[in-house]
Amino acid sequence: MSFGQAMEAVFKKALENGGKVKDLKPHVTAFLGYVIAHESHHRGQIALSLKQSGHTLDKKVGYGIWEWGVR
């Protein structure tokens, strides 16, 4: 199962459970916000690590890491 399929399953189950995600206090909308923020945090870590080590991202790559599903 891919990550996308696993997330789809979590959201479907949450919607069937009245918006509740198992073992998580907030509702499914808060969980979605968390997932997006967490993903953004990791992309920022990558960019910062490269910058601090003297390797800058060109604009194409910098924008490309935000385009999900494009490789």
Image (tube, rainbow, N blue to C red):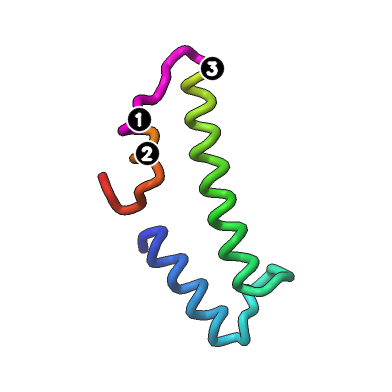
Q: Position of residue 62 (x, y in %)?
A: 39, 33
Mark 2 or 3 closer to N-term? Answer: 3
Residue sticking out furthest to the top = 54
Magenta-tinted stretch: 53-61
Give yes or no for residue 57 being in the magenta stretch: yes
What residue sits right under mark 1 in the picture? 59
Give the amino acid at mark 3: Gln
Front residue (pair 9, 39): 39
- Res. 63 mark: 2
Q: Position of residue 69 (x, y in %)?
A: 30, 53
What residue sits right under mark 3 in the picture? 52
Main SS, magenta region, reads loop
Count neighbours of disc 1 (C-alpha within 10 A) and say few if under 14, some if 14 to 19, many if 20 or more.
Answer: few
Q: Position of residue 57 (x, y in %)?
A: 39, 25
Mark 2 in CB contact with mark 3 (< 8 angstroms):
no
Give the amino acid at mark 1: Lys
Q: Is the residue 70 above or below the residue 12 in the image?
A: above
